[in-house]
Amino acid sequence: MMNNTTGSYRFDTLHKEYRHQELDRLERKANFFIELEKAKWVKAGLKSGMKALDLGCGAGFTSCEIAKITYPGTVIGVDFSEAMLEKAVEVKKSKGINNLNLELVDVYDLNFPDNYFDFIHARFFFQHLTNPMVAIENIYRVLKPGGIFCVFDIDNDWFTIYPKPESLTKLAQKIAAIQQSQGGDAYVGRKLWSYFSKAGFVKIDTQVEVITSDKFGLKTILNLLSFGSPYYSQYQDLAICAERAKKDTYSLIDVAEAWAGFGIFMVTGCKPDEVLIRI
């Protein structure tokens, strides 16, 4: 998603077998959230003809959906993983998208002109940033006056499951510690409003969409979890812990009273238009 020295998601370090598993998980996750996300984009102001930027575009699943809405406008999907971008090229071709460009770009060094984009999107991206304020200041710079910035992300305190296996609790603690040690933040959701505000955005709107097993089923919820898979290649002991946690957690599918839910933070803001800047 970004320079491997400055973020906590490092797809290019994954062993081959883990890469396939991770790509499958990311596609499953993208498909699950896409209708919710599209509704949020359109409500925020995304429309045909806009020039959009998708930060940390990964395999390009979401970038392609943004491109469909903005057509004939142009979308640029950026990532700092060459392997991810190779997959994104495949996804783009398979979907017949011709208004999406894919580039190897670091969010801390956005090589775009000032006031360039109408809409900028970042999905499950800020949780991995070592310097979120530096990133958001760069985003603010390349966004046009009146332009829209839209973020979807997590906050680990908004995940709960009952009954909660002890193995899952221990795994979650290990994952959060690893992510933090690599500069990430598993609790970024609650901080997004302040980041937007400090950067100068206005009309900031924060919503939390609660996803529960009541509506989607426990298995569907569990299938969205990574169980720390992005870190298995770096921490073999984590993979062992994860197998135990997976077994214990998936066994809850057969427990009648089991329940799970989590919240997704959705934050939008606008760069002040030229009239407001003069004031």
Image: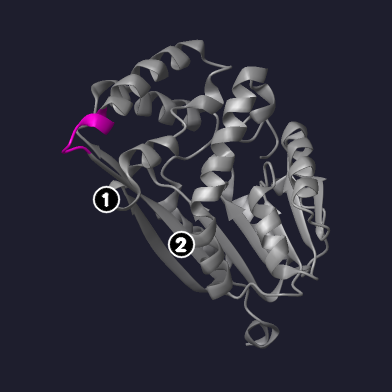
Q: Quadrant of the C terminus?
A: bottom right
Residue 227 at what x, y percent from top left? 43, 28
Q: Which residues are magenta?
A: 252-258
Dot 1 amino acid type? Asp
Residue 216 at what x, y percent from top left? 35, 49
Q: Quadrant of residue 256?
A: top left
Secondary structure beneath disc 1? Answer: helix
Residue at horizontal 41%, vertical 20%?
242
Residue 240 lies, with reference to residue 27, above or below; the image says above
User: Does any portion of residue 87 appear in the rendered image?
Assistant: yes
Q: Is 149 within the magenta?
A: no
Q: In front of the other: label 1 or label 2?
A: 1
Left or right: residue 92 versus residue 248 is right
Left or right: residue 139 versus residue 126 is right
Which one is in front, 20 or 207? 20
Left or right: residue 60 versus residue 203 is right
Disc 1/disc 2 C-alpha distance (Å): 29 Å
Circle 1: is it few (<14), some (14-19), or many (20+) Cα within 10 Å?
A: few
Q: Quadrant of residue 150?
A: bottom right
Residue linked to disc 2: 193
User: Does any portion of residue 8 appear in the rendered image?
Assistant: no
* Mark number, residue 246: none
Residue at horizontal 57%, vertical 17%?
234
Q: Is 254 within the magenta?
A: yes
Residue 278 lies, with reference to residue 269, above or below; the image says below
Residue linked to disc 1: 214
Q: Quadrant of residue 241?
A: top left
Secondary structure beneath disc 2? Answer: helix
